[in-house]
Image (cartoon, rainbow, N blue to C red):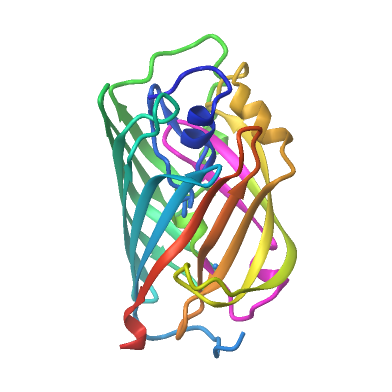
């Protein structure tokens, strides 16, 4: 599902979570992907149940759709994501991916305890599972196993502490709509790669498009990608993302809660913008 040149296909399949399993990739971020006022904020004691729909495009052409279902009771949560890649000529192969994660809900974020990713494509299928105990990696494996390469940066045990899975990290919590939404660092382990994403506040904006699943205030954050281990030193995508200054994510608040979800993700490429946009939002708290 991945070709090794610097094409829209490789950019699409790696950037939303910078996640690879050999030839099999998850197109989400936010990630999904993936992986956020005029509403009242505050730590919500009531359970949260939200379903969000996203479209993913390259240069304005839709190439994938993703749905995320989040249920959070304030102390624990479950989240499911499903994505379908429609394909685009020889640029993007068709396929599907699903994520199931459960974990601990705190006042500031969600921390995964059990994470499972499954992907399918014409070339075959793959599965990755990761177990966390108190934010530390307890076990992980992938099927089929990823063949070793000499240029792969080895994982260190010390790097697998105080980390999160790649989907839970992008559901934020904040009692205010302001710079503090962005001022944080994601320490992410995908089951294959370990990297950090540093967020910094860029601006407060207002989403007005009727074609999206949300209209209202949003917070724009700029992301800085920092590879740690598990990646290939010769990877063009890793080097491209590490040097990019145009990785942006807008977060939108979920009414009746302290939760922020991604409203839009944008990564500038030489082939056009790689974008993920929220197109539908069902908030069962409003029922």
Q: Residue at x 73, y 63 (%)?
A: 201
| Front-lying residue, 120 or 46 | 120
Q: Residue 186 magenta-drawn? A: yes
Q: Quadrant of the C terminus?
A: bottom left
Does the rendering let one see residue 161?
A: no
| Front-lying residue, 64 or 119 | 64
Q: Vertical placement of 96 versus 253: above or below?
A: above
Q: Residue at x 73, y 34 (%)?
A: 243
Q: Provide the residue span drawn in magenta.
A: 172-196
Does the rendering let one see residue 279?
A: yes
| Front-lying residue, 137 or 194 | 194
Judged left or right of residue 165, residue 126 is left
Residue 124 figure quarter: top left
Q: Residue at x 54, y 9 (%)?
A: 150
Residue 120 figure quarter: top left
Residue 59 figure quarter: top right
Q: Where does residue 126 sit, x and y in percent of width and height? A: 28, 29
Q: Residue 184 magenta-drawn? A: yes
Q: Where does residue 204 sit, x and y in percent of width and height? A: 71, 72
Q: Residue at x 42, y 53 (%)?
A: 55
């Amino acid at each position: 599902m991945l070709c090794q040149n610097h094409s829209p296909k490789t950019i699409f399949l790696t950037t939303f979570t910078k996640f690879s399993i050999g030839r099999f990739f998850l197109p989400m971020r936010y990630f999904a992907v993936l992986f956020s006022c005029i509403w009242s904020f505050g730590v919500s004691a009531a359970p949260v149940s939200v379903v969000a729909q996203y479209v993913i495009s390259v240069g304005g052409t839709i190439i994938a759709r993703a749905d995320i279902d989040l249920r959070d009771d304030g102390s624990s949560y479950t989240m499911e994501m499903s994505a379908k890649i429609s394909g685009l000529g020889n640029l993007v192969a068709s396929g599907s991916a699903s994520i199931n994660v459960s974990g601990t809900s705190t006042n500031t974020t969600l921390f995964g305890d059990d994470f499972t990713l499954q992907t399918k494509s014409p070339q075959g299928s793959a599965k990755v599972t990761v177990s966390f105990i108190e934010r530390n990696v307890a076990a992980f494996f992938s099927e089929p196993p990823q063949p070793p390469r000499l240029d792969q940066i080895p994982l260190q045990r010390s790097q697998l502490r105080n980390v999160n899975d790649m989907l839970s990290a992008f559901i934020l919590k904040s009692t205010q709509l302001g710079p503090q939404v962005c001022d944080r660092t994601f320490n992410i382990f995908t089951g294959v790669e370990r990297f950090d994403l540093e967020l910094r506040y860029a601006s407060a904006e207002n989403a007005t498009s009727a074609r999206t699943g949300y209209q209202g205030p949003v917070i724009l954050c700029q992301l800085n990608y920092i590879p740690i281990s598990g990646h290939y030193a010769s990877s063009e995508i890793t080097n491209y993302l590490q040097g990019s200054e145009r990785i942006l994510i807008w977060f939108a608040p979920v009414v009746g809660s302290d939760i922020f979800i991604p409203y839009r993700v944008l990564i500038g490429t030489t082939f056009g913008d790689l974008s993920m946009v929220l197109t539908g939002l069902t908030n069962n708290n409003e029922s």
